Amino acid sequence: MGTEEENTGVSSPLGGSQHLVSSVGSSIPVIPLTVPPPHPVAPAMIFPPIASLPTVVPSAAAPPVLRPLPPLPVRPPVLRPPAPSTGGSDSDSDDDDNKLTGSAAEYEFSEESRLVKERHEKAMQDLMMKRRAAALAVPTNDKAVRARLRRLGEPMTLFGEREMERRDRLRAIMAKLDVEDQLEKLMKAHEEEEAAASAAAAGDDMEEDTLQYPFYTEGSRALLDARIDIAKFSTARSALRLQRARRRRDDPDEDMDAEINWALKQVESLSLDCSEIGDERPLLGCSFSSSGNLLATCAMNGVGKLWNMPQVNKFSTLKGHTERATDIAFSPVQDHIATASADRTAKLWNIDGMLLKTFEGHLDRLARIAFHPSGKYLGTASFDKTWRLWDIDSGEELLLQEGHSRSIYGIAFHPDGSLAGSCGLDALARVWDLRTGRSILALEGHVKPVLGISFSPNGYHLATGGEDNTCRIWDLRKKKSLYTIPAHSNLISQVKYEPQEGYFLVTASYDMTAKVWSARDFKPVRTLSGHEAKITSLDVVGDGSYIATVSHDRTIKLWTSGNLVKEQGMDMD
């Protein structure tokens, strides 16, 4: 037979058509293949079984026909965690694992984490700065702190800055410079400049004499003589007082408690004996004479008046002030009267109404006025924050004393004459030694201005009253408050001890009452009610038999013990 050709068409399982060409003489079979496109990848399909094809018996020389295999389905890659590197591996798989590990190590921080990290770093920096600052040597003297700040080129002080704040600011500046490694260099340069300046100043000092300034204000010769006179007077008075106190203590016939009880019993029977219109304007001050026969009053119209006691008849008139008269006082040894006024002057009068002296020098209105126990000197308190001591005979200003931060309202002298007490609107009372000029006590306790002050005749008690409605008793020996009396429902305008023995004290108030208190236990003894307006001043006669009060209701009220009235009636009979 001739050449035999046979073409057989076989359909592919994938649906394609394949043509097998076979030749007798060919030794290499030619198998055309059709590869499906890789994308998109279709999911694996399940085909039904194909019926068997008829077997073609090739010739003996023909090779077997090879069937192509279907392509494998594409599987998605499986992500595995990066394996730790085990060292020298040269395979591609190891390189891929290393690349994967490096990319996984590169984490991204959130904004919140970044802020937290910045805050932590700043806190650590502040902590290190504080440690550095605590290790630095900073001067404690404020003057040295200011000088150091000036050397560092910083302002010496800021508005409202205090000493400790200034020192903390210097410490912070030095710590900052220390961190920047500039402190030593800067301080060294300044030290060199200071050394050169001090050397130049030392040369100048050698050439010129330095001025020595006193730390005190030098007084006049008249003040020195007055201090010597006061020292002699007070020494004699205190010796007599102590001698009398020792005698009464050692004498078995002396019964102090019985005397105090008798005096308080007399006070308990106090009653209104007389009420008189004192002026057409409100009354501001009153004072008894040393004998108790005269009473002096002053009013807002600047006029002072003298009254006979106990009938309360007008005796004389004192006219001369151009403003209201704020206080009036009788001399303890002479029949002289001193008045203080808002016209910044004090005047000295005799009982006939004749003007003797005018004391000028205060820069603001006067408040209270008081005579020294010797009768040679006059003390005035003023709203110019000073109190002054005047010579009665010459009218010279001996002493101008400062010490209060606000206006001074009240002034009083110790019975011995060695001390003076002042009180003012700074809620403070001060005790001054007239022999040396020093402030020996600052009595702090009132919470509002102090308006009244009085020394006890026993020599060691002091009473003050003020706008906090309380009367405080101070012990000069212990230098502290002994007792606080919640005395009134309004401010206390005046405080006075009974001047002879000091068995009781009297307080006047703007609540329209005056009250008597025991000096032994500071209990209330008697309340004097009768005024229709606030009481501005009071005074107690030497033996305690009379108490006079003046008020804004323009009346003078005289309070007398009922037992004393009975005794006087018996004497008349």
Image (cartoon, rainbow, N blue to C red):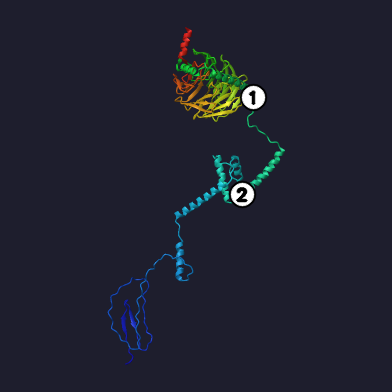
Mark 1 neighbour class, 10 Å CA radius: few under 14, some 14 to 19, many 20 or more: some
Q: Amino acid at mark 1?
A: Leu
Q: Quadrant of residue 533?
A: top left
The answer to whether marks 2 and 1 mark residues whose Cβ atoms lie closer than 8 Å is no
Marker count (numbered): 2
Could you tell me residue 536's position as x and y percent? Answer: 49, 22
Q: Quadrant of residue 64?
A: bottom left
Please name whichever residue, 139 or 494, is drawn nearer the observer in this view of the structure. 139
Q: CA distance from mark 2 to mark 1?
A: 57 Å
Please name whichever residue, 30 or 361, is drawn nearer the observer in this view of the structure. 30
- Residue 224, numbered label: 1
Residue at disc 1, secondary structure: helix
Q: Quadrant of residue 60?
A: bottom left
Is residue 291 visible in the rendered structure shown here?
Answer: yes
Residue at disc 2, secondary structure: helix
Mark 2 neighbour class, 10 Å CA radius: few under 14, some 14 to 19, many 20 or more: few
Q: Amino acid at mark 2?
A: Glu
Residue 294 placement, left or right of 269: right
- Residue 290, numbered label: none
Could you tell me residue 79's position as x and y percent? Answer: 40, 66
Could you tell me residue 68's position as x and y percent? Answer: 35, 79
Seen as rendered, the residue at the extreme top is 573
Residue 562 placement, left or right of 200: left
Seen as rendered, the residue at the extreme front is 252
Is residue 342 visible in the rendered structure shown here?
Answer: no
Residue at image location 66% in from the left, 46% down from the top: 192
Residue bearing mark 2 = 184
- Ranked by sequence position, the earlier of labels 2 and 1 is 2
Residue 167 placement, left or right of 119: right
Seen as rendered, the residue at the extreme bottom is 1
Could you tell me residue 490's position as x and y percent? Answer: 45, 25
Rendered-image quadrant of the N terminus: bottom left
